[in-house]
Amino acid sequence: MNSKKNIVVTGGAGFVGTNLIKLLLKKTKFNLISIDDYSSGKKINHIKDSRVRYIKGETQNIFNILKKTNNIHSLFHFGEFARIYQSFARMNDCIKSNSVGSNAVFNFCLMNKIKLIYSATSASLGNKGDDKNLSPYAFTKAKNLELLENLKKWFKFRYEIIYFYNVYGPYQISKGKMSTVIGIFEDHYKKNKALPVVKPGSQSRRFTHILDTVEICYLAWKKNLCRHYSIASKNSYSINQVAKMFNTKIKYLPRRAGERYVSTLASRNLSNKIYKKFGKIRLKDYIQDFINNNI
């Protein structure tokens, strides 16, 4: 095995990071180091395994956090501010995490010749690829892709990019302002409360299961081809359609700033071809299993 024996996962106590750590434990022999500020990550998500170490800290301090850690093979950077609507009210937090923090992570990987796997987002592609700055969140993510593109040009920096599409599944956040759509629907269903749908409800999304998502992250890491990948569902559903799958009450909320109406499945971004991958787990089956387990 490579003499470099550690993999770092930022956001390792969060939704995506926890599922990724479980997969890496299963498919690799590396030791895993999680860096998380626990703004949305939770200690209850910690995987109890001697190969995993959890560190509380902010990504902007990554040089100091990892100054005594050697033999880092690669870094999965998933520890960013990751909510569209909350980025309006918490723009400073969003910029601190996604711009200042991510710049530090990129620089750390560049200076130490560490392989980077970065989570992009369909939100950075806008509605049809033309309006990328619908929210502070989308803006910061789009600018990070531009920065990485230039780092590749200037310094031959190698990395993998994976575009996430409305991820759902185990360890998702179901309560509070950082909740996912499916998480919110599940929480309201369990409480016999009407499912909240933001008007008009016709906005479409490609909901993708977390296990499909982290599998593509792993494959991109393993292939090491310096590519852009997207992992999405083959089927696109409106929020109305998803809410109706739960076969319960629905209530409508006012329109919100930054709303996307189409989930763009782009073929290119910047100068890069996006290699499209599709999930195997169907949203309808997932929701039906959830309902069957909560009768």
Image (spheres, rainbow, N blue to C red):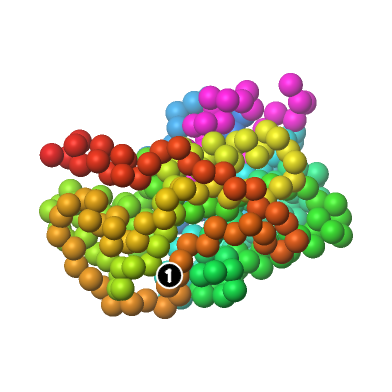
Q: Nearer the viewer, residue 68 or 92?
A: 92
The magenta region covers 1-30
In the rendering, at what x and y percent does residue 226 appear?
74, 46
How many residues crowd around disc 1 within 10 Å: few (fewer than 14), some, or many (20 or more)? some
Q: Is residue 116 left or right of residue 155?
A: left
Is residue 288 visible to the viewer in this orientation of the structure? Answer: yes
The quadrant holding residue 181 is: bottom left
Q: Is residue 156 left or right of residue 252?
A: right
Location of the C terminus (image quadrant): top left
Q: Nearer the viewer, residue 109 or 128?
A: 128
Q: Image point 62% across, 35% down: which residue?
A: 219
The quadrant holding residue 205 is: bottom left
- Tell me the kind of residue under disc 1: Tyr
Tally of numbered tags: 1
Reading the image, the residue beneath label 1 is 261
Image vertical order of residue 13 relative to residue 180, above or below: above
Q: Image point 26% across, 37% down: which residue?
A: 289
- Helix or strand or loop: what does disc 1 sit on? loop
